[in-house]
Image (spheres, rainbow, N blue to C red):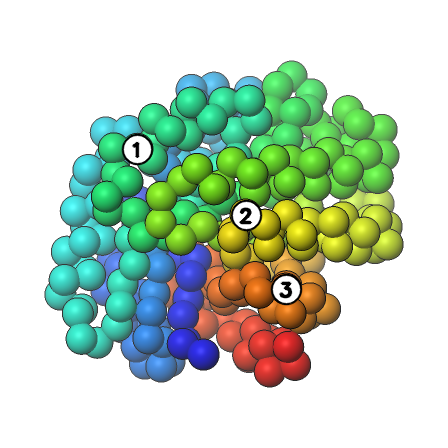
Amino acid sequence: MIKWDGHSHTKFCKHGHPDELERYLDRAIALGFERYSVTEHPPLPEKLVPDEGLMAELAMDFAEMPAYFEYVRDCKNRYEGRIDVAVGLEIDYLHDNFAFTQRVAEPWADLLEDCVVSVHYLPGRGGMRCIDYKPDDFKTNLLDYYGSMEKVVGEYFDHVELAIESAIRLPGRKRLGHIGLIEKFGRALPPIDEEQVRERLERVVPLLARTGVGVDVNTAGLRVETCGKPYVPEWFIRVCTAAGIECVYGSDSHKPEQVGLGWDYFEQAMRGA
């Protein structure tokens, strides 16, 4: 099994850290990683979410895309022979707006090696709302809007299934990002029915197998106080592996010191699989 971090961010992330990519890569090399996928947030439609302050923190502008790809490709070339740097994006599933996703990805199709497709936004109060912003925002703009956690979770997994179907039209290796992100605020909101989550995860497995879309085994939830666990359960990794679905560790690092966190969880889960 190649030691691979398949989900990471850079100084181009508006809610990330200004450190240079070299610091992330040097840490990855020191930890024994052989491949490192850089998957920054690409542009989003204007006014996707009603909160203008939040909107400014979410993603790159179109004007920054050439510099981002040049930056990562330069590091890829300079680190050749030490670590395989893969050029990628974390692309948001935008409900009923795949034309925008194509506008983002198509100009860079020849360069894209990895596409992590994630569900960060659901229809909510006043428009689309970010599911992983703040617990109070989730409660006001999603929970109160849908009326129950069961309905929010159901809507989320409906979007996950649509995201998988859309991912197959993207270039490079495709993975579904942090499938359990809906549980980020599990300790701060009304409880989520784990049986509902398990049933929806089981329903996703044949869809992943049919489309060839992999799984981002994202461990970032371990460092989130309101979550305290990886976003992908161990049993799901075992089931996916048995079904031939590629599972790739993802630190989702937004700071150099986050590279490699939770690798031991992934390694143990894969050994069990």
Horizontal side of 168 relative to 105 (left or right) equals right
User: Residue at left 56%, top 42%?
Assistant: 164
Asked whether the beta carbons under mark 1 and mark 2 sit within 8 Å of each other, the answer is: no
Assign a secondary structure to mark 1: helix
Task: In this rendered view, identify the residue nearer to me: 14 or 207.
Answer: 207
Amino acid found under the numbered disc labelled 3: Ala
Q: How many numbered circles are shown?
A: 3
Residue 133 vs 264, above or below: the answer is above
Disc sitting over residue 240 in the figure: none
- Residue lying farthest to the front in this orientation: 210
User: Residue at left 57%, top 73%?
Assistant: 266
Horizontal side of 63 relative to 121 (left or right) equals left
Assign a secondary structure to mark 3: loop
Amino acid found under the numbered disc labelled 1: Glu
User: Residue at left 52%, top 63%?
Assistant: 246
Spatial CA span between label 3 and label 1: 30 Å
Q: Which residue is mark 1?
A: 106
User: Residue 60 placed where, x, y %?
Assistant: 34, 35
Q: Which residue is mark 3?
A: 243
Task: In this rendered view, identify the residue nearer to me: 225 or 238.
Answer: 238
Q: Which residue is mark 2?
A: 211
Horizontal side of 210 relative to 84 (left or right) equals right
